[in-house]
Every structure is written in structure tokens, then in C-alpha cells.
Image (cartoon, helix red, strand yellow):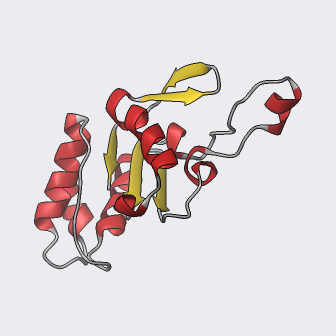
Amino acid sequence: RATALLEVGLIERECEARLLLLALVGGEHLLLLGPPGTAKSELCRRLSTIARLGYFERTLTRFSTPEELFGPLSLAALERDEFRRATAGYAPTAELLFLDEIFKSNSAILNTLLTLLNERLFDDGAKRERVPLLSAVA
């Protein structure tokens, strides 16, 4: 039933829909390769709606900054001499994460993503916090 809901109105996306569901249920990440317009992001958006998951998506470029993905620096924390990010609504708070064009990203983002994706942890200043990430799609 979930695959049918994901596939509505999409042509030849059965395999991708099933892989996406399998990755989510298995707690794994998924790499979808394909040209623009092949419903990669649409499938992720639909899944987040169907499963009622916290969702974050971003298209990365070589000019993308960590703030775009992980949240801006918290000014309130800086006033207390703490280096923390305001992560609400950004990648560290997502249960389903879609990162388009990840190969174009820079090393500052990729290095931080390693811990987020592999260990489900985010280094926020001096604190290392667990993230609710179930699955990431790139």
C-alpha cells in the first residue's frame, strides 16, 4: 500500500519507491543516481508525508555553506560564549534527509555529514548530540 501511494502519478518509479521504503524500514541510507526530473526528491517528499516524518532537503553546490544544512550559529549562545547552532528545522533534526547533488558539496559539509550519517551524531559546539535520522537519500 505504501509503495502504491508513493508511485501515484509517476511512471516507472516502482523500483525506486520500493528501495526508498526498504532503506527507511532498514534504517539505512540510499543513493539514487539519475538525471534531473526523475522524481528523486518527489519520492522523498511523498514518503515524509505518508510516514509523517520530520523532513529536510537541500540541493548542494560547491558554494553551499554549513549554515544552510546544519543551521545558523545561535546568537543567544554566542552571548554566553558558546559555539552552538540553531538546528531546529535543519538536517540535524530531520528523520528523513534528502541531499541533492551531494557530490558537488565542499569538504566542510562532507566532513560534518560523515558523523551525522554514519553514527547518527551531530557535533554542536562542545556537545555531541544524537540525531533522529532514520534514513538519508542522496
Which quadrant would residue 22 be assigned to in this image? Answer: top left
Which quadrant would residue 1 be assigned to in this image? Answer: bottom left
Q: Residue furthest top?
A: 127
Q: Position of residue 96 (x, y in %)?
A: 39, 46
How many numbered marks appear? 0
Q: Position of residue 69 (x, y in %)?
A: 55, 50
Q: Quadrant of the C terminus?
A: bottom left
Tell me, yes or no, if residue 51 can be seen here.
yes
In the depicted structure, whether residue 108 falls above or below residue 118: below
In the depicted structure, whether residue 110 falls above or below residue 6: above
Q: Position of residue 63 (x, y in %)?
A: 56, 64
Q: Position of residue 117 (x, y in %)?
A: 36, 37
Q: Residue at x 30, y 63 (%)?
A: 43
Which quadrant would residue 16 be assigned to in this image? Answer: bottom left
Q: Residue at x 77, y 24 (%)?
A: 82
Say left or right for 44 vs 4. right
In the depicted structure, whether residue 24 falls above or below residue 31: above
Q: Residue at x 70, y 46 (%)?
A: 72
In the depicted structure, whether residue 12 falls above or below residue 94: below
* Front residue (pair 55, 69): 69
